Image: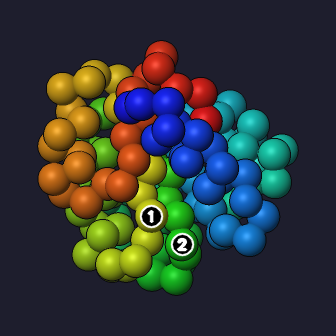
Amino acid sequence: MDLAAREKARRRIADPRVEVVIIDQDSSAIDEASLAGLRCGSGDATDAETHCEFGLAHVSTLVSTFSDETECVSITLAARDLNQKICIIARQERESAEKKLLQVGADTIVVQGKCCV
């Protein structure tokens, strides 16, 4: 992800007018995001109940921080299906997953170690 894309993702998350939902399996990441005042929680990102719980049909931005490529693709597909207007920022550990995530509907990809959002 280039510098302009990283800056766009950082600004979008920091914008108080933008409702952001963060779903993660790492409790320390959830705690950190919560302390920063972000709406977040843990759940099965491929489960429809989780989508309803976090209101993905009505939010403007989803940050997917799953390290597993399959889960990240699943949440991206499900979120895009539920909400065509949602901005999806997806984290991935390998650059090779970037093309696949863009194809399934992610707007911005953060490759671990290259971006700190």
Q: What residue appears at the point 43 percent right and 71 percent down from the top-left corner?
A: 86
Q: Quadrant of residue 7?
A: top right
| Residue 116 against residue 60 in the figure, above or below | above
Q: Looking at numbered disc 2 in the image, what kind of residue is underneath it? A: Ser
Extreme bottom residue here? 58
Residue on which disc 1 sits: 87
Q: What residue appears at the point 31 percent right and 45 percent down from the top-left corner?
A: 72
Residue on which disc 2 sits: 60
Extreme front residue here? 4
1 or 2: tag closer to the N-terminus: 2
Identify which residue, 68 or 89, lies in the foreground: 89
Q: Quadrant of the C terminus?
A: top right
Helix, strand or loop at label 2? It is loop
Q: What residue appears at the point 62 percent right and 56 percent down from the top-left corner?
A: 12
Q: CA distance from mark 1 to mark 2?
A: 6 Å
Q: Quadrant of the N terminus?
A: top left
Give the percent coordinates (x, y) of residue 52: 47, 78
Identify which residue, 108 or 43, lies in the foreground: 108
Q: Is residue 59 at all visible to an observer of this figure?
A: yes
Q: Looking at numbered disc 1 in the image, what kind of residue is underneath it? A: Cys
Q: What residue appears at the point 67 percent right and 68 percent down from the top-left corner?
A: 18
Give the percent coordinates (x, y) of residue 63: 50, 51
Q: How many marks?
A: 2
Left or right: 68 with respect to 1? left
Helix, strand or loop at label 1? It is strand
Left or right: 81 with respect to 4? left
Give the percent coordinates (x, y) of residue 75: 32, 57
Q: Is residue 27 at all visible to an observer of this figure?
A: no
Question: Neighbour class for label 2 at 10 Å: few (<14), some, many (≥20)?
Answer: some
